[in-house]
Amino acid sequence: MGEMYKARNLNVDKKNEDTWKRIRAFFQPYGITALEVTMMGAALGVTKGGRKPLSKSFGTGGVLRGSQEFQRFAQGLITAIAVEDAGSLKILEEKSEDIIRITEEYANGGLSEFEKIVNSSDDDDIVFKHLLKRLNQSVK
C-alpha cells in the first residue's frame, strides 16, 4: 500500500493556510505532526463538515511519503476514507492523486469544526478532551 502514496505530501487549501498554521502551532509543543493534524481534520470532516474541494492546493498538510508508523497508519486511513466515500473498493483502481484528494477535501471540510475545538478553551486539557470526544464520534 505504501507504494501508492509515494507520489507527494498532503495538501491543504492555500486560502486556509493561516488557519492550518494556527492549529498546527497549537499541537506542535505536544509533538503532533502536520500529517497527524491534517488527518484529525479529515476525521472531523468525515463526520461534520463533509467534502470541500480545495480552491488552491498547498503542500503543508504533512509528509505522507515514508514508512514511519504514523505515515503507514495515515496511508491506511486515506485508503479507508476513499473506500467509504466511494462505497466501493473500485476507487482503489483510481490514481493515487484522486484517492489522496478525497482525504484532503474531508480535511478542508473539517477545518471549521477543528478551529472551533482548538479555540474552545484556553485550557489545553479541555481542548484535548473536546477533540477526543469529537474524534471518537467520528469512528462510531
Image: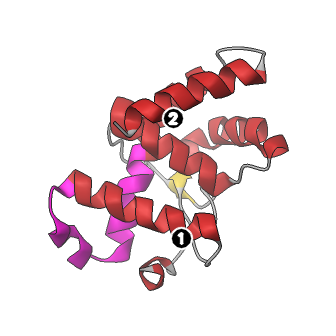
Look at the image and tell me in which quarter the N terminus lies.
Answer: bottom left
Q: Which mark is residue 18?
A: none
- The amino acid at mark 1 is Arg
Q: For the residues labelled 1 and 2, say whether their Cβ atoms are less than 8 Å apart.
A: no
Residue 49 visible: no
Magenta stretch: dominant SS?
A: helix
Residue 94 percent across, percent down from the top left: 24, 75
Q: Quadrant of residue 103?
A: bottom left
Reading the image, the residue beneath label 1 is: 72
The percent coordinates of residue 30 (x first, y second) are: 80, 43
Residue that appears at 64% across and 41% down: 20
Across and down, in percent, residue 12 comes to: 54, 51
Cα–Cα gap, marks 1 and 2: 23 Å
- Label located before the other in sequence (1 or 2): 1
In this figure, which residue is indicated by the disc labeled 2? 111
Q: Which residues are magenta?
A: 86-106
Judge from the rendering whether residue 21 lies leftward or rightward of residue 140; answer left or right. Answer: right
